[in-house]
Image (cartoon, rainbow, N blue to C red):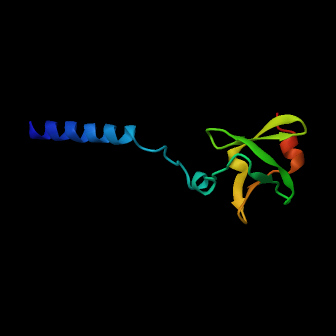
Amino acid sequence: MKSTWFVAAIGTVMVASAAGAAPAISSPQQAANAVHAVEGQMLITADGARLARVYHVNADGSVQVILDYRMVTVPVITLSVKNGELTTSLTRKQVNSIN
């Protein structure tokens, strides 16, 4: 009887903990790529050129920029901070080819 109570109590604590927990980072690469982009921040290309200001930050961390009169979503996996600047590993041409 005691062991049944103990297992039930542990299960309740685990469920309660998981409900309020922050989303888990599933890989070291995700942890390294955890970038906090801000609307209005300048996005820099892989070759160091200014691309555009961040128009919107999506819930998944990807950013939207207006480039050549259209909205383009730059994937979060390509974003990093280098020398204090928000940088994408893509070139302007690659970003421009995103649908």
User: Where's residue 76, x and y in %?
Assistant: 68, 46
The quadrant of the rendering that contains the C terminus is top right
User: Where's residue 25, x and y in %?
Assistant: 52, 49
**Residue at the image point whose x is 87% and y is 39% from the top:** 97
Q: In this view, does 11 lie above or below 45?
A: above
Residue 89 seen: no
Q: Which residue lies furthest to the bottom in this view?
A: 83
Q: In the shown orientation, is residue 6 left or right of residue 18?
A: left
Q: In the shown orientation, is residue 8 left or right of residue 79?
A: left
Q: In the shown orientation, is residue 28 left or right of residue 96?
A: left
Residue 63 seen: yes
User: Where's residue 87, x and y in %?
Assistant: 75, 55
The quadrant of the rendering that contains the N terminus is top left
User: Where's residue 10, x and y in %?
Assistant: 24, 42
Q: Which image quarter: residue 73?
A: top right
Q: In the shown orientation, is residue 14 left or right of residue 38?
A: left
Q: Which image quarter: residue 94?
A: top right
